[in-house]
Image (spheres, helix red, strand yellow):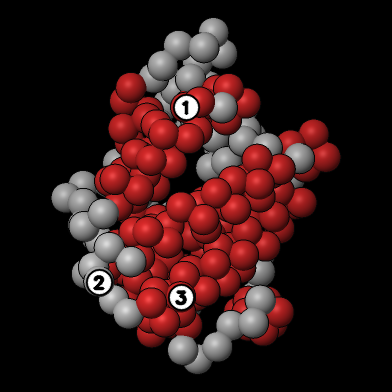
Amino acid sequence: MISAIDEVPGYSYGSKDIQPSSISMRELEELKVTVGWTSDDPNYLRLAGEVLAEQTRQIVDQWRNGIIASIPSLARHSRTPEGDRIPEYVANSGKRFEQWILDTCLRPYDQDWLNYQQEIARRHTSVMKNKVDGVRSTAYVPLRDIIAFIAVMNETIKPYLAAKGHPADEVDKMHLAWRRSLQLQTALWAKLYMDTSAASSEW
């Protein structure tokens, strides 16, 4: 199961319209070594995906409404420049956020996955932010906010991983694989930020 969501607006994984990643598969493999990736991690990520599949809405709701909404410097990225909510944008991007959880756990980390990592980054920089949904909001999400919020996602995901009653050691291994994946993805996203002409101002 790759999707627990009937329709994900703006989700185009594997589409021919997605630009090929500027990062090679060889570089991806080198980064996996750097984060301590093991042959067990894909198995524990798949297990995590099975555990999280029915919880994605609750997880994203906690991240966005329980945490991000209370931090003005983060909440503004889903609002108009005047500070007004954009309900459709929140709903659509929320579904993509849910799908990202599943992709993190259940997709093979192949060329399509690598290409979509670049697409995710593009949609957070001034290159493409707001364009998929056709809204007026902040021009980009600063890289510093993404890197900092990874710590929150890593911390808050563990109770969800434990929700199905798996032994503590399996939960720990799922959690470790999740954290390695997020560290890996953050490194990949940073490359696109560095490639943009406005990289210094989008930190």
Query: Who comes first in sequence, dot 2 or dot 3?
Result: 2
Measured as percent of width and height from the top left, residue 115 is found at 52, 64
Does residue 98 appear left or right of residue 148 in this picture? left
**Numbered label attached to residue 165:** 2
Going by the numbered disc 2, the residue's amino acid type is: Gly
The answer to whether residue 26 is visible is no
Does residue 15 appear left or right of residue 51 in this picture? right
Residue depicted at x 62% and y 65%: 183
Residue depicted at x 68% and y 37%: 142
| Tag nearer the camera, 1 or 3 | 3
Q: Is residue 174 above or below residue 70?
A: below
Mark 1 lies on a secondary structure that is helix
Mark pair 1, 3: CA separation? 29 Å
Going by the numbered disc 1, the residue's amino acid type is: Ala
Mark 3 lies on a secondary structure that is helix
Mark pair 1, 2: CA separation? 30 Å
List the residue tagged with mark 3: 172
The answer to whether residue 194 is visible is yes
Quadrant where the C terminus sits is top right
List the residue tagged with mark 1: 69
Measured as percent of width and height from the top left, residue 190 is found at 69, 55
